[in-house]
Image (cartoon, rainbow, N blue to C red):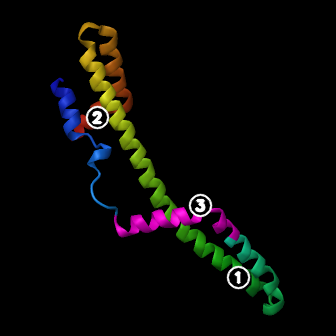
Amino acid sequence: MTNTVARADQHAHMPSDVSGRPGFFDRFATAASGFASRAWFFALCVLLVVVWAPSYFVIGSVDTWQLIINTATTIVTFLMVALLQNSQTRADASVQDKLNAVAAALAALMEQQSENSSDLRDATKELRQAVGLEDREKSS
């Protein structure tokens, strides 16, 4: 392997670079995401609305009745957006790291095989530029 490829392998952020267990919030966000993505969570939300709808007759005031459901759904939505965004951001980063690993390995293989082919050297250069491998090597 050339020095460029060796440097990319040493400094690239790869899936194997991830170490240890995720923090408490990340584990909580993952669990909440799993909880919210189930059919029974949707059923629970429908049940909330079904229970809330006839509560008008107990509460009597339309404003208070609407305020209860608006407040409850706003709080749940606000918290779920934060938790789901955390899970989504971590999933996106994980996928990107895996794609970077595949691109780096492919570029290294292509570079190794490109000694006799200028077309393959050009394709390797194009691959590195397309996925930003050169930028990643320089920023490390």
Amino acid type, residue under disc 2 in the picture: Asp
Q: First in sequence, mark 2 or 1: give its number.
A: 1
Report the quarter where the C terminus lies.
Answer: top left
Q: Which residues are magenta?
A: 23-43
- Determine the main secondary structure of the stretch shown in magenta: helix
- One can see residue 81 in this view: no
Residue at image position (37%, 40%) is 98
User: Helix, strand or loop at disc 3?
Assistant: loop
Residue nearest the observer in this picture, 23 or 138: 23
Q: Nearer the viewer, mark 3 or mark 1?
A: 3
Q: Classify mark 2: residues with Cα within 10 Å, few (<14), some (14-19) or many (20+).
A: few
Q: First in sequence, mark 3 or 1: give its number.
A: 3
Residue at image position (29%, 51%) is 18
Amino acid type, residue under disc 3 in the picture: Ser
Does the stretch in magenta take in 58? no
Q: Classify mark 3: residues with Cα within 10 Å, few (<14), some (14-19) or many (20+).
A: few
Residue of label 3: 37
As drawn, the label of residue 11 is: none
Residue at image position (30%, 42%) is 14
Residue 122 appears in which quarter of the rendering? top left
Circles 2, 1 touching at the beta carbon (< 8 Å): no
Q: Where's residue 3, x and y in %?
A: 15, 27
Residue of label 2: 135
Residue at image position (64%, 78%) is 72
As drawn, the label of residue 67 is: 1
User: Helix, strand or loop at disc 1?
Assistant: helix
* Residue at the farthest right position: 57
How far separated are the C-alphas under marks 3 and 1? Answer: 26 Å
Residue 19 vertical position relative to residue 26 in the rendered view, above or below:
above
